[in-house]
Amino acid sequence: MTIIDPDTRPNLYDLSLAELERLLTGWGQPAYRARQIFRQLYVNLAGSPAGMTDLPLALRERLVAETRAGTLTPDRIQTADNGLTRKALFRLAGGAMAESVLMIYPDRATVCVSTQAGCAMGCVFCATGTLGLVRNLSPGEIAEQVIWAARAMRDAAADRGASHATMHAPLPADDRWWAPVESDEQAQTTPASSMARLTNIVFMGMGEPFANYDRWWRAVELLHDPRGMNMGARSLTVSTVGLVPGIRRLATETLPINLAISLHAPNDELRSALIPMNRRYPLAALFDATRDYLTATGRRVSFEYVLLQGRNDEPAHAAELAALLRGETDIEGLPLHLVHVNLIPWNPVPGMPLGRSERRRVIAFQRVLQERGIACTVRVERGVSIAAACGQLAGKKT
Ligand code: SAH
Ligand code: SF4
């Protein structure tokens, strides 16, 4: 898949620090200039080399002429949840569209970024899947979405400092995925957010990260680099539809990022009906790879389970899911202390003949799992009104 971009100037956000050093030394510049530029890009969140005032003017001019510091053009920014959820629709070089969502909580701020424009996987409940794959995103295009979110956090903190106009609205309930609570869905009022910086990145926007593994992983390394943004590996989470080679590869990486796997069904027949990719990597193969991942890393895995009214949300499905995880079917189970199920009531996508599970069905499903010793939480979605919730991203103006 080629990336159609008539402008051949390198995007500085596509370059690792080592590559930036090669570029700069090739220009006869000392290597430390590259470190300055890298800091400008990932710490100062510079929009253009013109503003990198710690560089000599001639170098700034050459950078402006011969490189680009970013290639995404925000087409539209929408907000919801009293400004605590923000969705950006970006136009990419060549015209494709991709979306990112920033979600601000009292104790953290998470950006959900896209790794592809569209997606080839065709899951029947997902808005992105209806687009097909438009194209892969480059490392810089993935990283730049994070830069957008980090800038938004910085600007919001600056505004608060200037006007004391803190966001005094009641927050929606937190979606603590990992907390073994009964349900975090209860309405609750929490203090206004004073978060000043981006704390978490989830690769759960448009696209399948493991279908664009190399570019996606380069973005992970760019964002993790301690000489730049320095995002801790534990604050990064990737979600996969279940591409077995990707899970196996992630298990060998040295950076301990978090893994979420989209499960959505307790047996192959139902899972294949919802996720075509299940025919290629059925549950037995997925569980083998997951078990090996758990053994190799010792890190927890989260299974996402989208609840579709009447399709996969019966108590019998929950019991079957518990049996699957516990190894009570003909598929070998998983170490339960390393497994967590995150229930996601389906977010409506116009035109899809599917329904969102009623709340009482969600709670009943959760209870069946918990009674069988499976850690399980319910995700509270953000940004439904602006189609920014999970699976509603379709790169269109809504
Ligand atoms: N391609 C990856 C990551 C992007 S999708 C994956 O499939 O895991 C992120 C999550 O949103 C997945 O768990 C996906 O199944 C879920 N999702 C997709 N459409 C949804 C919808 N309409 N409502 C709720 N969740 C949805
Ligand atoms: Fe692609 Fe994930 Fe949507 Fe499936 S759920 S179509 S893998 S983005």
Image: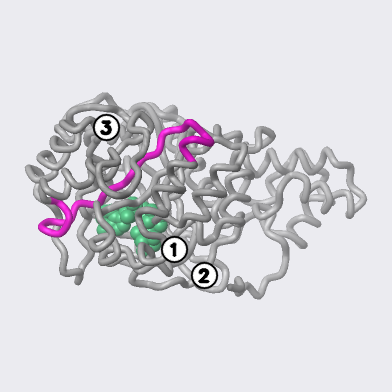
Asked if residue 157 lies left or right of residue 230, the reply is left
The three-letter amino acid code for the residue at tag 2 is: Arg
Q: Is residue 175 left or right of residue 21?
A: left
Query: Is the C-beta separation of discs 3 and 1 under 8 Å?
Result: no
Q: Amino acid at mark 3?
A: Ala
Quadrant in the rendering for residue 186: top left
Q: Which residue is mark 1?
A: 75
In the image as oriented, which residue stretches furthest toward the top?
191
Q: Earlier in the sequence, mark 2 or mark 1?
A: 1
Asked if disc 2 and disc 1 are in contact, CB closer than 8 Å, the reply is no
Q: Name the residue carrying label 2.
A: 135
Highlighted range, magenta? 293-313
The residue closer to the viewer here, 194 or 364, is 364
**Would you place residue 57 above or below residue 295 in this image?**
below
Residue that badge 3 annotates:
375
- Front residue of 271 and 174: 271
At label 1, the amino acid type is: Asp
Q: Mark 1, residues whose alpha carbon is within 10 Å: few (<14), some, or many (≥20)?
A: some
